[in-house]
Amino acid sequence: MKKYNTYYYLLFVLLVMGAFASMAQNNYGLKIMGIVAFIFGVLFLTQLVYVLKNKSKIDYLVVCELLGLFTISLILGLRVYYIHFELVELLFGLAGGLLIAVYGVKAVQLFKEISIKNKVLALLVLCFYVSLILYILSMTVIPFLPVFSEVFGILAFVLLIIFGVVSFKKKQMNYGSERATSITVIAANKDRSIVLMSLFLLFTVYMGLSKVEVLPKMYSDEFPQAYFELVNTAEMGQGESVDGKYKHEEFKEKFEKFLENAERRNVR
């Protein structure tokens, strides 16, 4: 796990650079973020292959975690490039559900194990994983129950703040014959929860700052803003399909024809 930390750090830097480039109305910003999503997917897939090759000892929780993370990374990368395929929302939901199940099992296992040595530390670790589960739930239910997405996100952020404040005040606590912090105990579990939580935290901070207009919204000039509003409506299950096509698909076709006609006129 540690050998991938450098790659994760570089990807976080690229992600922030892409976000700021997009906010500065540079179209390549979103493309950078899409590439970052694909590279995350490749890293998760590489780890998955390595785990499966170790036939003598396969941890199926790790397999499920990496499979879920790979699927979500791939779908998010495709979304940046406006690539949509049938049942993608269902696949996205299943991958999110798989991660929720994995981290739910881990949360219960760790709570039972740690509470024997330190109940406060066990509650902090449980708080961290419940926050992560709520964040994943918030992301997963967007296409199905968009109304609840923000509620789950707020609850996740509140739990994360509680975790951060108490962890900062308590700092090192007794853990058997040693002393440890909540973060070191979570990191010792060797899963990808801290990486995933860091991504969610970045996204939460950006969403909060953009809502109060401290930071501008991300920008793409490939299609008009109306197109993205139609895409979001369709992904939330609120759009209607006419003759097998959603409004954003029809909008895209007509807009591309408009650009082609405009280009021909310019050539003449």
Image (cartoon, rainbow, N blue to C red):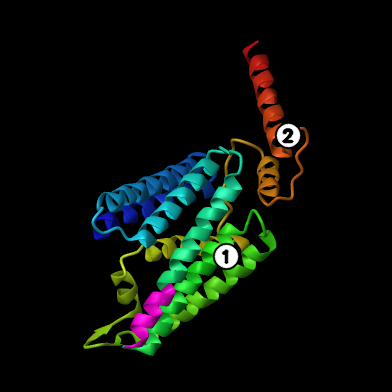
- The residue lying toward the viewer, choosing from 266 and 48, is 48
How many numbered discs?
Answer: 2
How crowded pointer 2 is (Cα within 10 Å; few <14, some 14-19, many 20+) is rated as: few
Where disc 2 sits, the SS reads loop
Given residues 33 and 268, the one toward you in this image is 33
Q: Does the segment drawn in magenta span residue 111?
A: yes
Amino acid on which disc 2 is placed? Gly
- In the figure, is residue 59 to the left or right of 214? left
Magenta range:
107-116
Percent x, y for residue 77? 48, 44
Residue shown at 67% from the left, 32% from the top: 252
Q: Is residue 178 left or right of residue 80?
A: left
Residue 180 in which image quadrant: bottom left
Residue name at image x 77 percent, y 43 percent: 240
What amino acid type is highlighted by mark number 1? Gly
Instruction: Determine whether 19 is above or below 133 in the image.
Output: above
In this rendering, is residue 25 above or below 114? above
Residue 244's label in the rendered image is: 2
Mark 2 and mark 1: span between their CA atoms? 37 Å
Is 22 one of the magenta-colored residues? no
Tag 1 or tag 2, which sits nearer the N-term?
Answer: 1
**Which label was assigned to residue 208?**
1
- The spot of residue 10 in percent (x, y) is 33, 52
| Residue found 60% across the figure and 44% down from its top | 87
